[in-house]
């Protein structure tokens, strides 16, 4: 179910959702009448009106929703949301800004970073890996990252094994600390092969 006060937004989502309703999500009685208390998950995506966002969150908390996600615009907004009862707070604008910053360097083709500084990236195979197996190039010990998979042109994705040989045009799926992924993607040498 999608709920919004603006009729035009409700109309946009009417064909995409089972139920799209024009209503005031800050009104507990309205939310009860709509049956919102029967849902186990809720997402509050009100970013432009801090008051409406937090009031909606309070209503959902009062209704006993067990899993509430809230879009926050600032760390302060997120902290308040958590104190009121949000189980998950996301910062889409900040997250996208960080993601774009990583992609803009040209080293990373795609990138996802988690809260603890750990990331997963899709990169072009660095020169150090060309024509070597992963075991031969010592990626994990030299760079502190793990090659999870390899995508070769016109072939299916393959999970990476120590015996996987890397070719110059390969795309690698790599996981590890964000800074170490960046170093590996740049082809910067960290240490000699063991």
Image (cartoon, helix red, strand yellow):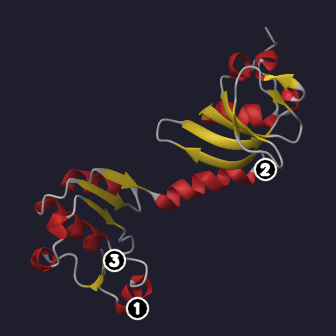
Residue under the point 26% across and 51% down = 82
Question: Mark 3 — residue?
Answer: 18
For residue 4, above or below residue 45 = below
Q: Distance between the residues labelled 2 and 3?
A: 41 Å
Question: Mark 2 — residue?
Answer: 106
Q: Distance between the residues labelled 3 and 1?
A: 17 Å
Mark 2 crowd level (few <14, some 14–19, many ≥20, 10 Å Cα): few
* Sequence-wise first label, 3 or 1: 1
* Sequence-wise first label, 2 or 3: 3
Depth check, mark 1 against mark 2: the one in front is: 1
Residue under the point 61% across and 36% down = 178
Q: Which of 33 and 142 is in front in this view?
A: 33
Question: Mark 1 — residue?
Answer: 8
Q: Which of 16 and 168 is in front in this view?
A: 16
For residue 114, above or below residue 89 = above
Q: In which quarter of the image is the C terminus?
A: top right
Residue under the point 16% across and 75% down = 31
* Sequence-wise first label, 1 or 2: 1
User: At numbered mark 3, what does the secondary structure look like: helix, strand or loop?
Assistant: loop
Q: Position of residue 56 (x, y in %)?
A: 22, 69
């Amino acid at each position: 179910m999608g709920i919004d006060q603006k009729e035009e937004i409700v109309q946009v989502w009417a064909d995409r959702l089972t139920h799209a309703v024009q209503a005031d999500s800050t009104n507990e009685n309205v939310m009860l009448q709509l049956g919102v208390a029967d849902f186990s998950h809720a997402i509050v995506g009100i970013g432009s009106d801090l008051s409406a966002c937090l009031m909606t969150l309070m209503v959902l908390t009062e209704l006993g929703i067990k899993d509430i996600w809230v879009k926050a615009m600032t760390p302060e907004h997120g902290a308040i949301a958590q104190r009121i009862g949000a189980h998950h707070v996301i910062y889409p604008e900040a997250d996208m800004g960080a993601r774009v910053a990583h992609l803009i360097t040209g080293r990373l083709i795609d990138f996802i970073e988690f809260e603890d500084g750990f990331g997963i990236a899709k990169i072009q195979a660095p020169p150090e890996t060309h024509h070597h197996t992963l075991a031969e190039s010592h990626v994990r010990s030299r760079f502190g990252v793990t090659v999870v998979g390899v995508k070769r042109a016109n072939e299916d994705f393959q999970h990476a094994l120590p015996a996987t040989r890397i070719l110059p045009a390969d795309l690698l799926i790599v996981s590890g600390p964000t800074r170490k992924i960046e170093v590996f993607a740049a082809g910067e040498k960290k240490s000699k092969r063991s």
